[in-house]
Image (tube, helix red, strand yellow):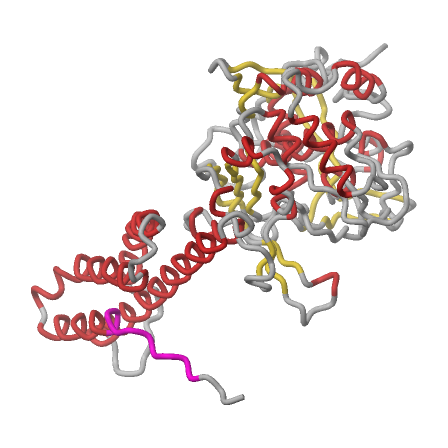
Amino acid sequence: MPGPLYATDKEPCIPVLFLDGHQEYLGWRDVLLHAHTIEDLALPLPPAASAALRLLVAFAARVTGLDDPEMPAGEWAAHRRALLKSPDGFDPDAVHRYFDAYTWNLFCRDRPFLQDPRLAVQCEERAGVNKLVFGRTEGNNLAWLTPHTDTDPQPVPTEQALWHLLIHHFYGAAGMWSVRTVNKQRISKAKAGPLRSTLSFHPLGRTLYETLLAGLPKPTGDWPGIVDYCPWEEPHLPDPLATPPSVTWPGRLLTGRSNHAVLLVPTPDGRHVTDAYLTWATKEKLPAADPFLIHHVDSSKPITERHTPHRADADRALWRDLDALLLTGDEDPGVQRPEAFTTLNDLPPDLRAQLRARVYGFDQDGKTENRTWYTALTPPIWPWTQEHDPSAAVWIAECRKEAEAIGELLEKVSKDAWRTITSSPGRAPKRLPAWTKHARTAYWPRAERVFWDLLSHPDRDARAAFAAEAVAVLRDVTRPAVAQHFRAARAVAQAVAELRRPPRPTRRRAS
C-alpha cells in the first residue's frame, strides 16, 4: 500500500506575502514561479524563515545557472544583473525541470524530503512530537506556557512540522538524543546545528525574486573540484559514520551541513504529524563560513577556527551591528561582514538604492537552551556602505563605538556607586546591582534615538551626546536613593562627573 503523500513542492506549506498585500500558502515550486509578485516570506517562526531562505537561494542558483563554479566573476555578475532586469521572474520551464527531477514528498518510503528513512530501524525509540516542535514542553519539564504534555501529545499540522524540521537541521541542539545504531555502534550524541545561536542577515529586495538573486553569494574559487549536491540531490543516503564530503558551493554550503537526522511519523492521510525520530546525523562537523552571518576573525587561530559567528542576543538592538554590514574588512579586520553583502556593488543601481536587510535571530546557548527568536528590518543600507559613502560608513561605526563605550562606562560607574553605599570597601557585589540593571535597560533605547539623530548631524560630538543620555538615565535610576541618603548623592555625583569626563588621549609611540 502506498504511504501518505505530502509533496512540499506543491502542497501549500510556505506562507508568503504578495505585493498586493494578501497572504497565501504555496509549495516550493510555486514560491519560485511567483517570486516576482511576492514581497516577502510570511513564516511566523524566524529561524524557519532563515532556513527556508537558504533553501530558496539554492533553488534560485540551480534554475538560473548561477551555480556554475567555473563561471568567471565578471560573467557571473553580468548574468545576475540580466536576470534582475527580467520582469517575469524565473523561467517557468527551468523551475519545473528542476522540481520534477527530485523527490519532495515528506513521507516518501525511500527518500523522504530532508529526512533519513533508516531511523525507523536504527533508532530504539521515538522522540515524540513535543520534542519535534520548538516551544512545546517535553519530557519531565513543567508546562509553564503551553498545555502540551507527553501524556497527551497533540498532532501538529504537516506544514508546521516542516517548519520545525528545518529549524532542527539548522538550529538543532547539541547533546544526547535518541540512540542510533549503525554497524553495531550505538551513538546518541549529536553536535549543534550550523546556525545555532546565530544572527542571520539577508539582503532584502523589493520582491522575493530580487531577494533571492541579491542574496546569492558568488563563487570565490575556494571550493574543491567535486560535484556539489543539496541533500535531496544526493544520489545515495549518506553514511553517518563516514567523513562527510567537503563543503561545496552553493548546495552543501547553504543546505547540506546539518548535524541532525529526523524522520517524521504522519497520520494515515498525511495532514498531521504525530511523532518523530530525532538523533545524530554525522560524527564530524562541517566547518564553513556561512554567507549570511557576521563573523569575528581571530588570525592567531588555525584557519578552520578563525571565524566565530556573531551570536544572537535578544537584548541587543539591531543598530549596534549595522556598521558590521557597511564596512569592508580593511576598515575593521577583526569583523567580517556577511559574504552575501560583498557583491552589492554588482547589483543594478535602482535595486541598490532600495536594498534593506532582513535579520533573523535565535537567542540560544551553545547546547540545549532556547531563549527566544526574533526578526528585524533595517532601512535601505546601500547609501551608507563604505563602497558608496566611506565617510558615512565610518561615521556610523564611530557613533556605534561611542555608544558602546558610554554604555560600558555607565555600567561601571553605576556598579561603583552602588558598592559605595551598600558594600564594604573593595568588596564586589555578588549580583548585578539594581542601579546597573535599570540603567542598562533605560540607556539603550535612548541611545538608539541619539544614534539615528547623529547620522544626520556628523558635526556633533557623538561621545558627548551619548554621555548626556547616560547621565540622564543614571539620575532617573538613582533619584529615590539620592533623596534619602547623602552618601548616595555624593556617589552619584562622582559617577556623573566620570561620565562627563572626556577620554584620555592615546599616547603615541615615537617612531
Residue drawn at point x = 74 percent, y = 61 percent = 304
Task: Say which quadrant the N terminus sits in.
Answer: top right
Q: Is residue 202 left or right of residue 457?
A: right
Q: Residue 219 or 254: which is nearer the viewer? A: 219
- x, y (%) of residue 114? 76, 30
Quadrant, the C terminus: bottom right
Residue 17 visible (yes or no): yes
Q: Residue at x 73, y 50 (%)?
A: 189
Q: Is residue 318 left or right of residue 69?
A: left
For image coordinates 27% across by 56% down, the residue present is 438
- Magenta region, main secondary structure: loop
Indicate whether residue 160 is drawn in magenta: no
Q: How many marks?
A: 0
Q: Nearer the viewer, residue 433 or 216?
A: 216
Q: Quadrant of residue 4?
A: top right
Q: Quadrant of residue 81?
A: top right
Residue 292, given in percent of the width and then of the height, sits at 62, 44
Describe residue 52's horizontal placement relative to residue 376 as left or right.
right
Determine whether, in the image, residue 438 is placed left or right of residue 28.
left
Up-down relation of residue 267 to residue 301 (above or below):
above
Q: Is residue 506 magenta?
A: yes
Closer to the camera, 229 or 107?
229
- Name the one closer to the observer, 437 or 200: 200
Range of residues picked out in magenta: 498-507
Q: Tell me if residue 266 comes above or below residue 305 in the rendering.
A: above
Q: Position of residue 433 (x, y in %)?
A: 29, 65
Q: Position of residue 158 (x, y in %)?
A: 64, 20
